[in-house]
Amino acid sequence: MTDAEVEARGRDILSRQPFSKSLGVDIVSMGVGRTALRMPIHEGLTQHLGMVHGGVIATLADMALAFTGGPVMGDGAVTQEFKINYLRPGVGDALLARGEVVASGRNQAVVRADVFVIAEGTEKLCASAQGTIMRAAR
């Protein structure tokens, strides 16, 4: 697949995910083995201290992992597992997740995703995740 085909497929998949659409997630760019996703921050995504809820950050990280590793694994690929480290509070205008394939084999891909908070035009690393995307059993 070409980068353009991967991005077109990713946009189609995203358009069919009601949960992701409700969060306002958009594809910034997507290609073979890499993805960038953006999500605006609004009050409905925050917790009691005014920062983005960790579950929201984890959701965006998981999406970046899956949208990055999925094209490498083929149709129906899913997240097998992931781990996330929260590095700073999500306070700002938007979140940006960038994913890249670390390594891949026949049945699984190890993928990394960094989530940045964008505040006043500046990106700061907010969280880092690593996970395994697996070829779905058929």
Image (cartoon, grey):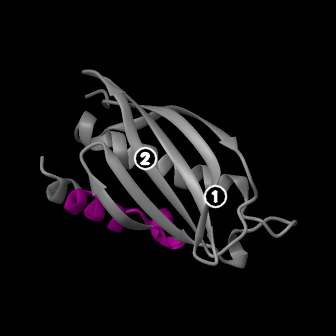
Provide residue 97's location: percent of width, then percent of height: 50, 56
**Number of on-image labels:** 2
Using the image as rendered, state which of residue 47 and residue 126 is in the foreground. 126
Q: Name which residue type carries label 2.
A: Gly
| Residue type of the residue flagged with mark 1 | Val
Q: Which image quarter holds the C terminus?
A: top left
Residue 21 on image: x %, y %: 46, 70
Task: Pinpoint residue 108: horizontal percent, then vertical percent.
Answer: 34, 25
Looking at the image, tell me whether mark 2 or mark 1 is earlier in sequence order: 1
Q: Residues within 10 Å of mark 1 (few under 14, many from 20)?
A: some
| Residue range of the region highlighted in magenta in the rendering | 7-25
Between marks 2 and 1 in the image, the one whose residue lies nearer the viewer: 2
> Which residue is pictured at 37% across the width and 65% down the height?
27
- Label the magenta part by its dominant secondary structure: helix
58 on left or right of 25: right
Q: Label 2 vs label 1: CA separation?
A: 16 Å
Q: Determine whether, in the image, residue 40 is placed left or right of residue 17.
A: right
The residue lying toward the viewer, choosing from 46 and 37, is 37
Q: Secondary structure at mark 1?
A: helix
Residue 83, position as x, y percentages in the image: 61, 34
User: Circle 2 — which element?
Assistant: strand
In magenta segment, residue 19: yes
Q: Residue at label 2?
A: 99
Q: Residues within 10 Å of mark 2 (few under 14, many from 20)?
A: many
Question: Does residue 50 appear to the left or right of 74 in the view shown?
Answer: right
Quadrant of the rendered structure where residue 95 is?
Answer: bottom right
Instruction: Single out the residue that lies furthest toward the left.
Output: 1
Q: Is residue 82 left or right of residue 110?
A: right
Q: Is residue 27 above or below residue 112?
A: below
Q: Indicate whether residue 34 is drawn in magenta.
A: no
Residue beneath label 1, please? 56
